[in-house]
Amino acid sequence: MRPWDVPRLYRRAILIYVATIVAPACGLVWLGVQSFERQRQALAALTAEKLATEMEAVLRTAAERALVLHAHPVAKYFFTIEHGTVTRPPLYAPPPVPVPREFSEAERQELDGNRPDLALEGYRKLLAAHQHDSLALSRVARCLAKLGRQDEARAAWRTLAQSYPDERDPFHRPYGIVAAIESGDTADLYDQIAAGRWDLSADQAEYFLAQLDPRRTTPYLEQFRFARELSEQFRPQSALRESEIYSYSFGAWRIFYRVDAGDALSGFAVNQDWVNGNLKPQLQQALGISDTSGQDLRIYGGAIALVLVILSAGVALLLRDISREARTSRMRSDFVSSVSHELKTPITLIRLYSETLLRPDAFREQDRDGFYRIIMRESERLGRLVDRILTFSRVERGDQVYNFEEGDVAPVIARVVDDYREYLERAGFRLERTLPASAPPVRFDPTALSQAVVNLLDNAVKYSGESRKIAVRLGADNGCVTFEVEDHGLGIAAAEQERIFGRFYRVPNGSGRGGYGLGLFLVRHIMDAHGGRIDVESEPGRGSRFRLMFPRAVV
Ligand code: ADP
């Protein structure tokens, strides 16, 4: 596989990653979930059984107490069943009791003879004789109403309601209710009935409450509704043992009951919702049962996910490194071919001209000097090239040593520029130099500085395109000594301006000039070693300006 075949490399790495890590991890998660589920079910069955036993015991204890005390927070709707019929709470009022005999005469006059006035006399006599006070008073009130004496009638009803609220008429209806309704004093009558002030039967309570406010329903009425359902549907177990408590599920209710003396049953209902909503959680807490399997599963899943994330991050890093390495290796191989190419040109020229010089008949005498100059120029170029490669290899190994000295960079730069000028001029360049005779002192390595300046000048020439103008400037600025090389050539796109300082980096499809991407890398290395920096300002098509900045030496 070629090292730069990165996409293929990625595909393989991802495949390997999925096959060796993701797939087994998913398998593990699946197995884990299965085993958690089995454990959860087993545990749930165990705890449910324990809870049910515990709950039954608690309920039974509560039931025993409730049946003794006839009141308990758990219990609702107490009942008694005799001969298969609910007797408590009573559903129907008993048949009316006959009116006492003393009332027959007055009643005859009132009802058959249609003489309320005479009847009134009779009832009043009974009242005066304190015979069945409440009944007599109610009859007096009824006759007064029939005679149209409404105010007197109302006063009589009111007295009756206030004096005999708990006595009942022949239909078992408390005067506290019937007389209050007749007199119109019903302000808190509804609430009193609904609170169970009188022990009414279902038909009575429903009748009165519906009369007072047909829209409302009350727990008091609901108790009768429950008793009715019970009466219709409840089938107690046969062969009941005395004093044993039985239980029975009845719709939303759980019923507890036992046999009393005779064959009467007494019991009460417990709301199942209350059992599940209150009692169960309380018991669960008391028994230390909590459903942690979901939590365990989350922790397990989370751990696997975390491992996967870490592994993925590792793989991503690895891939990044691999691709970087592949890129570097590609650059290295480009480098080798560029260097070989660069070496070949001067060597070819040197050989060509040396061979020519060895055959005196092959050239004219006046060309001799020119040939020598070419041989010299090319060997210098060769020397520079080799220098650069050697420096690079020292930098790579970390062996590059700089010999710093404090002094003036101006003469060093001037000498390099002068040496270069001839080459520039021969190539048709016009050099604009702004080089003062001296600059503020800096700590620098003259050889390294020369190399940096040459590299910048080399680039300016190489990337000048059609332009033949190069400027060099030395100056001082903000505590720095600066040296600039400016060309008006190809320029560098903004996105490339940082990359060009990387080793082996060459702008893709750049100028096509010889080069191997080391020049600027070395310049930056040199500037870093000097505690200074290099920056570039450039615009494609308009040229570039590279600037070296050396910190001034502290005097
Ligand atoms: P080389 O010149 O040997 O390719 P360098 O490290 O000197 O290597 O430069 C890196 C890249 O930066 C070059 O390939 C070129 O594309 C770009 N570059 C450098 N100097 C200039 C310049 N003065 N004008 C335009 N492009 C430049």
Image (spheres, grey):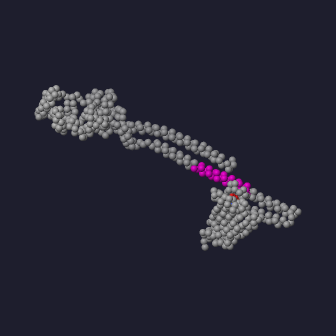
The residue under the point 70% across, 68% down is 432
Q: Nearer the viewer, residue 160 or 142?
A: 142
Q: Can residue 217 be seen here?
A: no
> Is residue 505 in sight in this rendering?
yes
Q: Position of residue 147 (x, y in %)?
A: 16, 33
Q: State the image quarter where residue 230 is shown.
A: top left
Q: Which region shows up in magenta? A: 313-339
473 left or right of 168 in image = right
Horizontal side of residue 62 vs 505, given as left or right: left
- Residue 83 magenta: no
Quadrant of residue 281 within the rendered picture? top left
Residue at 65% in and 46% down: 8
Q: Quick one: 206 or 53, which is closer to the camera? A: 206
* Outermost right residue: 361
Measuring from the top left, give residue 340's x and y in whole percent.
75, 57
Viewer-side residue, 458 vs 321 = 458
Q: Position of residue 346 (x, y in %)?
A: 77, 60
